[in-house]
Structure formats: structure tokens, C-alpha cells
Image (cartoon, coloured by chain):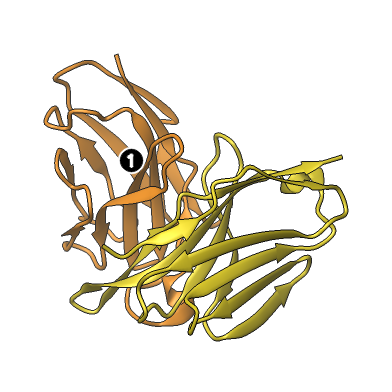
Amino acid sequence: DGGITQSPKYLFRKEGQNVTLSCEQNLNHDAMYWYRQDPGQGLRLIYYSQIVNDFQKGDIAEGYSVSREKKESFPLTVTSAQKNPTAFYLCASSRTSGRGSSYNEQFFGPGTRLTVL
Amino acid sequence: QKEVEQNSGPLSVPEGAIASLNCTYSDRVSQSFFWYRQYSGKSPELIMSIYSNGDKEDGRFTAQLNKASQYVSLLIRDSQPSDSATYLCAVTRYSGAGSYQLTFGKGTKLSVIP
């Protein structure tokens, strides 16, 4: 059963704490992405990775970090430097991130809701 | 800043009617266009992709693309209450090093009234 999984579904963070969100895919996709969604807002790109051991900053990378040690996994760490981390975090993957029409189709995991206490 | 604009709605249509959702984009070189459906509290689900000018039909959904006008639309025929959701328009943009990313609009909330 192919797809993208994210865990946990809900996460609560105390001030000054780092937390890590998990994202795993078994679609054999090369590219993976992290987005943040705030109420009434579109999705904003945090980080993306085209291949293993490589990743690039998106539009709002400050206060976040990622790693891509395996093709299937792309965890996101929300650090204490992120001043307003409460949001819905979405992980996505696509076959590639290069030019190629359907290869750009991104598929999303179920998301993680992060709340700062 | 490359932008994707959508009317936030809510767009209300009666059951059985045609819902028309519109999206404009600013990057003239965008090549790929997508429509996602997002139910409240859930993640986006890809429902349509379109890459060339004209219409593309899939069941009750039709996507329309006009690159000259930088305009893409989604028509939903025979609208059902289960179509009530927020619809996100996404457009590719070049981000360097041979990589293309998606820019999302803020979405249009559709409400289908029984």
C-alpha cells in the first residue's frame, strides 16, 4: 500500500524546545518537500530535497532544519529559533522536481499539527 | 515574487449545479498547473493536472488553461455536497539548479448546498 506517512498527528511543544516531525514515503519518489499551512493561508515551502544527501531552503526556512539520509525519509526539526511554530505541517513527495509535467505532481501526507504551549 | 491568486470565497452553489473556480498566476514561464482539494482539517489531495492550453476532463471535473491570459480554472459539474471543500491552485516555478517547485494560491472555499 503506497503512500506518505507523517507522525505524530498532533504535537505539543514547550517554549525553547526542539521537536522533530517524521515523514516517510514508499512511492520510490526522488523529491520530498515540507510545507507549512497557517489558517486562511496557502502552503509555504520550508525545505525541499531532490535526492538523498541533498536539500535546499524554501521560502521560509529560518528556524527549521532537515536531513535526507535515506530516499524514503525526510524529517523536519522545528528549532527554538522558530518564533511562531504553531501551524499545520505537510510533507509531500514527487517523482522528481525537474521539468517534466507529471513528474512534478506532488502527493501529500496526512500532516502534523504543531501547537506551542 | 511569483504569485498565484484565487478568490477566497466562499463560493456557494446548489446541488447539481456547475461550480466554477478560477486562478490567475504571474509567472509567464510556468509550465505545469494543478488543482488540489482540501477538506477541513485534512491534507491536500491532487484532483487535476493540466500542462497545455485547452480543456482536460476527468469525470465531473474539467480543468481549463489559457497561458496567454495566465489563467487556469476548474469546473465541477453536477456538484455534490461532498465537493464542499477548499480548492487550491498550484503552479510550477523555477527555483534554480534544474529544480521546479510549486507556488500555491490561498484557496477557494466551495460550499454545495443540498
Q: Which residue is rendered at x = 22% and y = 47% of the image?
A: A60
**Residue at x 42%, y 80% (from the top left corner):** B31
Q: In the image, is residue A96 above or below residue A83?
A: below
Q: What count of labels does the image hold?
A: 1
In this picture, residue A92 sits left or right of residue A80:
right
Specify whether A57 is left or right of A94. left
SS category of the residue bearing label 1: strand
Q: Position of residue A20 (x, y in %)?
A: 25, 34
* Placement of A84 over or under A117, stated as above or below: below
**Whole-percent x, y for residue B111 in the image:** 71, 42
Q: Nearer the viewer, residue B72 or A8?
A: B72
Q: Is residue A19 above or below residue B32?
A: above
Residue shown at the point (69%, 61%) measured from the top left: B20
What chain is tagged by disc 1? A
| Other-residue count near label 1 (Cα within 10 Å), few / some / many at <14 / 14–19 / ≥20 | some
Q: Say which quarter of the image contains residue B42.
A: top right
Judged left or right of residue B10, residue A37 is left
Q: Is residue A3 or residue A34 the one in the foreground?
A: A34
Is residue A26 toward the left or the right of residue A32 in the image?
right
Q: Amino acid at mark 1?
A: Ser
Q: In the figure, what tint was chain B given?
A: yellow
On-image quarter of the C terminus of chain B = top right
Closer to the camera in the image, A61 or A110 = A61
Q: Give the color of chain A as drawn.
A: orange
Front one among B68 and A110: B68
**Which quarter of the rendered picture does the N terminus of chain B lie within?**
bottom left
Instruction: Name the residue that disc number 1 marks.
Output: A22
